[in-house]
Amino acid sequence: LTSTENGAIFEVEVEVNNQTFYLVPDTGSSDLWVPVADFVCVDPTGRKELPQEDCQFGKLYQVPNSTTYVANETFGVQYGTGIALGKVAYADVTLNGIRVKNQKVGLVDRTNDKGDGLGSGILGLGYPPLTSAHPGTTLDNTTLLFNRAIYDPVFVSMYKEGLVEPWYSFALERPLKNATTGPGGWLGLGQLPPVFHSNDWAIKPIEVTESLPEELTGGVRQITLMTLTVDGITWGNASNNSSTTNSTKFQAVVDTGNHMNLFPVAIAEAINNAFDPPGVFDEESHIYIVDCNATTPKLGVLLDGHTFWHQHQDDLIYRDTSGSCYSSIAPTAESGGLALNFLGDAFLRNVVSVFDFGKNEMRFAARTD
C-alpha cells in the first residue's frame, strides 16, 4: 500500500485491463470504479461542471474499443463525500498478480469525488449487497441506495473462483514525518501481512447493521458492511494512570476508507476533552480542532475481552496538508437519516485486521513492532 495526504488515504496498485491504477482499498464499500478519460468533474452539488483537474485524479481509464458493457444496467454510488455515476462494464482485474476475468466494474463518467493526485477511484472490498449497479438505462439519484442490481465484487469473485482463501488482512502504517506520501502498509489476500503482532486474536462476528433501513438490502436483513459490536471504550490522562471506561456497547463499521474513528457523541466529547489543551468542536466540519502539539489521552477500544490501545500521538492527531490539526476522534453525525459509528484508520494502524467472508467474522491482533 501507498499512503498519501499525510496518512489520510491508503492506495493499492490494481490493473484494470492492463492499465495500472492506484485505488483506495475500501472495506466500507463494494464496487471497483475508475474515472474514464472523458469524465466530467462536477462541484459538490453535482450540478456545475468543473475542469477535470479539479477532481485531482491520477491516471484516467482509456476505455478499450473492445469493451463489453453490461446491458440495461447503470453505475451509481453515493458516499459520505460524494457521488460517482457511469456505466457497468466487464474488465479483467489483477491485484497482486491474481487475475479475475470478466469482472463487473464501474466506469465513471461523472463525479464530484476528489482524488489526491495519485489515486483514481476505489477498490471496494465489502459484501455483494452493497454493490452499486442499478437496473435500467437511466439513473435516478434518489434511488441509488435502494434499487440495486447486485453482483460479486472483485475479492468475492477471487475466492469463489478458488484463487485465494476467503479472507483478506490489513496492516496500516503511520505516515512518515514531513512526508505527505510514503509506504502505507500491507493488504494480504488470504494471507497475513509481514509484520510482528500478538498471537492472541480478538474475534468478532460481522453483524447486520441495525441502523441501515431494510430497503437498502431489498427488504431482507443481511450483512452489508463490516459491522461489529464494540464492547466499550476506555480513555484517560496519559501522564497519570487515571482512566474512564464506558462499557455501553455500540455497533461500528470497520472502514479502511475512513481515516477517523466516529464514536457516539458523549464518548467523542469526553475523549476530546481529555486532550491537553482540550479539542474545540467545529460545528461546520463536525470535527474537533486540536493543537498540533497537544498531549493526547490514552485511548483503548474493547473487543472480545481485549483492549486495543492507540499507541501513538499520530493516531489521535491528524495534521492535514495545510498544516492545521484536528482530532481523529469525531462524533457520529446523521447523514441522510443514517447514523453510523466507525473504526477507521486511526484504530486500524494499531492492529493486524482480518476480514473473513468464509466465517463472517473479523479478527484483530495487536501490532508488536
Image (cartoon, rainbow, N blue to C red):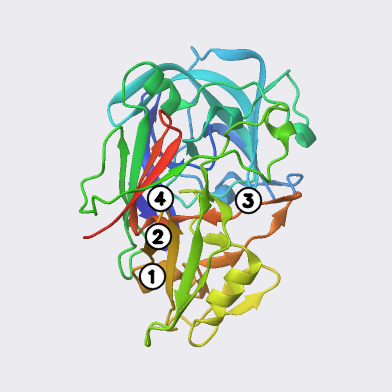
Q: Amino acid at mark 4?
A: Phe
Q: CA distance from mark 1 to mark 3?
A: 23 Å
Mark 3 or mark 2, which is nearer the start of the sequence? 2
Find out whether the residues at labels 4 and 3 contact each other: C-beta distance under 8 Å.
no
Which corner quadrant holds the C terminus? Answer: bottom left
Q: CA distance from mark 2 to mark 4?
A: 7 Å
Mark 4 or mark 1, which is nearer the start of the sequence? 4
Percent x, y for residue 128? 55, 27
Residue placed at 40% from the left, 28% from the top?
358
Q: CA distance from mark 1 to mark 4?
A: 16 Å
Mark 3 or mark 4, which is nearer the start of the sequence? 4
Q: Amino acid at mark 2?
A: Gly
Residue labelled with disc 2: 7
Percent x, y for residue 83? 66, 42
Q: CA distance from mark 1 to mark 2?
A: 9 Å
For residue 114, say whether it is visible. Answer: yes
Q: Report the front residue among 138 and 233.
A: 233
Mark 3 or mark 1, which is nearer the start of the sequence? 3
- Front label number (1 vs 2): 1
Percent x, y for residue 3? 37, 54
Task: Provide the secondary structure element on which disc 3 rests.
Answer: loop
Residue labelled with disc 3: 81
Residue labelled with disc 4: 10
Residue labelled with disc 1: 314
Give left or right: position of 42 versus 26. right
